[in-house]
Amino acid sequence: MSGLKIALVMAAALGLGACSNAAWDDTRFGGSGAGAGAAGSVSDPTSPAYFQQAIGDRVLFAVDQSTLSPEAEATLQGQAQWLLSNTDYNVTIQGHADEQGTREYNLALGARRANAAREFLISQGVAGNRIQVVSFGKERPLEICSAESCYAKNRRAVTVLASGLTG
Amino acid sequence: MRTYLARLAFYGLTLCAVALVAAGPGAAQSTGPLRIEIDQGVIEPLPYAVPDFIPDTAAAAEYASLIARVVAADLSGTGLFREVPASAHISKITGFDDPVKFADWKAVNAQALIAGAVSVNGRQLTVRFRAYDVFAENELGGGLQFSGTTDGWRRMAHKVADAVYSRITGEGGYFDSRVVFVSETGPKNERRKRLAIMDYDGANVQYLTNSDAIVLAPRFSPTGDRVLYTSYETGFPQIHVLDVGKVQRRILSTDDGIMSFAPRFSPDGRTVVYSQSQGGNTDLFTMDIASGQRARLTTAPSIETAPSFSPDGSQIVFESDRSGAPQLYVMPASGGAAKRISFGSGRYGTPVWSPRGDLIAFTKQNKGRFHIGVMRTDGSEERLLTASFLDEGPTWSPNGRVIMFTRETQGASGRALLYSVDISGRNLKPVRTPDGASDPAWSPLQN
């Protein structure tokens, strides 16, 4: 803390649901995923690696939109099936925006995107209490060029697995 | 007594001002004809001279020149004043109470002259100054004296410059103020952000948080003693409040898993207005800071964010996409019917009410460019002050004449820096920061 005395006083109420705080230790900054290895082998269909790479852990969105494309729905169907048969895992869906927009609006837009993915998983039978959402707005781009080729990959909702939360 | 840390945050707090007795006969006129009318659109900056101050004691020698240089940087930095450099001076100020040789200053066309003296006793530093209207040959307002600790010498220079600026423009000053901002390091896809605070001119940077969690958009309380900001410390964006003097912080929004962001203080400092996202929908809420009691202000399924109170506390301007694209709206501070005020082409965001109450600054996105602009509070007389790949997040100087904002450059090596611009659209310039910087918030004038 470089000499700065920082006393964090958390309100007591925070303790209630704190079980989920480990959810994004691996992929804390946006679940960038590209090459980042999730646990296990891709050939093991019960592994997080399979979820991330074989099914696909992310869906992409059009500019300023949170509507799911047919491809996005197909990916989310795969995610839902996996979650229904691997009930030890909960998920946090991270919503992201490209850099075209103000910080505040993009936070709200990322929340919309993450929630669209959440609602779809719920419609496929995944229990709502297994799915948290968080928006990173434009804070954690995956690709860093300032062109549509990068923006298209940054407008995403990434489903990040967290294990052992139900116990 | 204050701790060492508290002194770090508020060095020179013992500062006090004393009016000086007039220099000599006929020099006590309170107002002269020397005046810049800012609203008239100044084309030619007013020439002035500020010779090195006179050291009254040996220990004051190092400060005498430094203080004059900071006064000059403040005044010339406004774009309204132009310094006549020391190399052009014919006359020297030899004694603080000696008669001024006006003819020598007229000869170099210095219309205003600032003369000062500095004394140091132990850790105590005292600055005296007088300002003169050279062509009228009289004093411009009375002399003033400021005292404080030696490590607060820059603040005393800013106080001198504020007094001179105020006497010549008729506006409040803004130099003795601070800026809280987000300091940025690291690559674009893994930016490390921490809260920092500095003087308005970039001096005396201190860091208030480490960079373990993303922090966003700090906002000063009306008295400058606290800062609201958004932090991902819990994994979710949530609102925290930081006591600047004690460097102590606590979380305000305590609902696990619910996102809260875009906080701002009410003008009385008791209430926070902010955005909360739930079920994908972002609405505006207020929270009473003491009791934690909350009230919902909006219920629309659209995005409502970036709220800002009017200075009288009666209204809130905010950004909403209820019409399809983000636009600006004004509603009563307790919620209720909102009136759209932005109608130009493009997308509008981050509205901020001026401390004078007369204007709203905003971010506008149009045809692939970003602008900082101002409009009257009813949305009329929109003027764009800047244009770039990405300008956003305006904040007002304490006197409502200058706007500071974030400018980010494009591409993989894109970097955010702070800029300031006069509300006339002139005097656009970068603000010095050690690293990348974003999300500035300007404090009120310090006491």
Image (spheres, coloured by chain):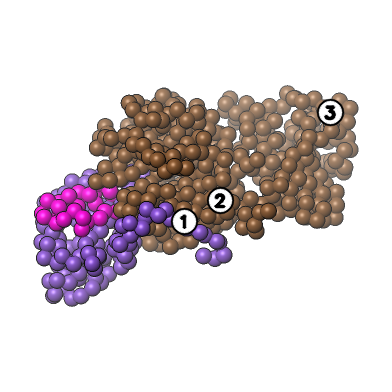
Residue occupying the point 18% across, 53% down: A128
**Badge number at residue B244:** 2
Badge 3 element? loop
Instruction: Indicate the quadrant containing the C terminus of chain B: top left, top right, bottom left or bottom right.
Output: top right
The chain to which mark 2 is attached is B
Q: Mark 3 to mark 1: distance in Å?
A: 57 Å
Query: Magenta stretch: dominant SS?
Result: helix
Left/right of residue B400 with respect to residue B12 in the rendered view: left
**Badge number at residue B418:** none
Q: Colour of chain A?
A: purple
Q: Amino acid at mark 3?
A: Ala
Please state the horizontal and vertical placement of residue B93, each as a whole percent of the image.
84, 42
Residue B309 sits in quarter: top left
> Which residues, given as a range, are shown in magenta?
A109-134
Mark 1 residue crowding within 10 angstroms, few (<14) / some (14–19) / many (20+): few
Q: Nearer the viewer, residue A45 or A66?
A: A45
Please state the horizontal and vertical placement of residue B213, each as a whole percent of the image.
41, 59
Judge whether B68 appears above or below B162 on screen. Answer: below
Q: On the same chain: label 2 and label 1?
A: no
The chain to which mark 1 is attached is A
Q: Amino acid at mark 2?
A: Val
Please state the horizontal and vertical placement of residue B175, each as a whole percent of the image.
63, 41
Residue A156 sits in quarter: bottom left
Which residue bears the numbered disc 3? Answer: B27
Q: Colour of chain B?
A: brown
Which residue bears the numbered disc 1? Answer: A9
Badge 1 element? strand
Judge whether B395 appears above or below B206 on screen. Answer: above
Residue B353 visible from this viewpoint: yes
Q: Mark 3 to mark 2: distance in Å?
A: 42 Å
